Image: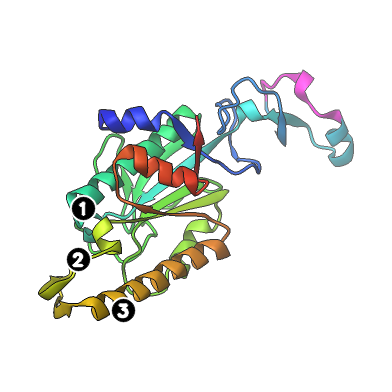
Amino acid sequence: MRPECDAEARRWKLALPRRVLHGVAGDLAARGAGASLEFEAHREWAAGDDPRRIDWRAFARTDRLQVRVTRAEVAPALDVIVDVSGSMALDPQKARATTDLLDAVLLFGRTSGARPRALRAGGDVLQPGETPVFGGRERGVVPRAPLRTRSVRLCISDFLWPGDPSPGLAQLAAGATHLFVVQLLAPSELDPEPASAVALVDCEDETRLDLRLDAAALAAYRVRLERHCGAVAEAARRVGASMARAVAAEPRELFAQLARAGMLEPA
């Protein structure tokens, strides 16, 4: 992680959902509760468990030995899905912001006691410390590698491909404790410069389009982009995801945008 990104990331943490976060016994709570004894759930008694933690009322109701699990014993899995298609590296600023955001979210997971890992959209798991290589032609956000059941999931993508984003987000949300969605765009994608005549070449499939970027063309582009971004936000809303649209920027401003969207909170 870049030092300037690390310094800023340590000021924040994910605003994780208040609902129960499923995980494994013995680790820290996902919200950093540490020694908190707040009751979360039951699990089956296993050899070696302290008999003093058996819930005898639950045993009377169910005839099964169960122990009370506290917040300090719950560590959720955190699956971070990153789009590595060519459009995510449209310019160096966007590529850097994508990598900064991925590194920061993995850090948020580690420092809060979660079990984070990164996965390529349309691909496999990124190994710890592996920097994503951009340039793929995947048109979607679902990885090939299976997502962990009941994990917290966060997807980073620009969603700039034809088609409905709903099926992909529905797949990411299925079986998740919670889904975060970050739509990351470059400043030039939001506000392109006018030009008398340009040749646009798709950075993923090399399709060429010759046109004039006059005021009318730019106005039509902005309407279509806003409509597309609205479709992404609506798809996220339908599956109960937290959604943020961010503009590629240096870490301080990038994380501030996510905080304003309610996705981050002070550490």
Q: Label for residue 220?
A: 3
The kind of secondary structure the magenta stretch mainly shows is loop
Q: Earlier in the sequence, mark 2 or mark 1?
A: 1
Q: Earlier in the sequence, mark 3 or mark 1?
A: 1
Q: Which residue is mark 1?
A: 134
Evaluate whether residue 229 shows in this view. Answer: yes
The front one of 191 and 181 is 191
Image: magenta residue range: 47-56
Label 1 sits on a secondary structure element that is: loop
Corner quadrant of residue 54: top right
Q: Residue at x 85, y 38 (%)?
A: 63
Q: Residue at x 69, y 22 (%)?
A: 49
Question: Does the stretch in magenta take in 48?
Answer: yes
Q: Label for residue 193?
A: 2
Label 2 sits on a secondary structure element that is: loop
Mark 3 nearby-residue class (10 Å; few <14, some 14–19, many ≥20)? few
**Where residue 90 appears, x then y in whole percent?**
20, 57
**Where residue 253 appears, x then y in whole percent?**
35, 42
Q: Label for residue 186?
A: none
Q: Earlier in the sequence, mark 2 or mark 3?
A: 2
Q: Residue placed farthest to the front in the image?
A: 215
Gap in Å between the C-alphas at discs 2 and 1? 25 Å
Corner quadrant of residue 192: bottom left
Q: Residue at x 44, y 46 (%)?
A: 258
User: Identity of the amino acid at label 1?
Assistant: Phe
The front one of 39 and 11 is 11
**Where residue 254 appears, x then y in whole percent?**
36, 44
Q: In the shown orientation, is residue 58 left or right of residue 47? A: right
Question: Does the stretch in magenta take in 96?
Answer: no
The front one of 51 and 203 is 203
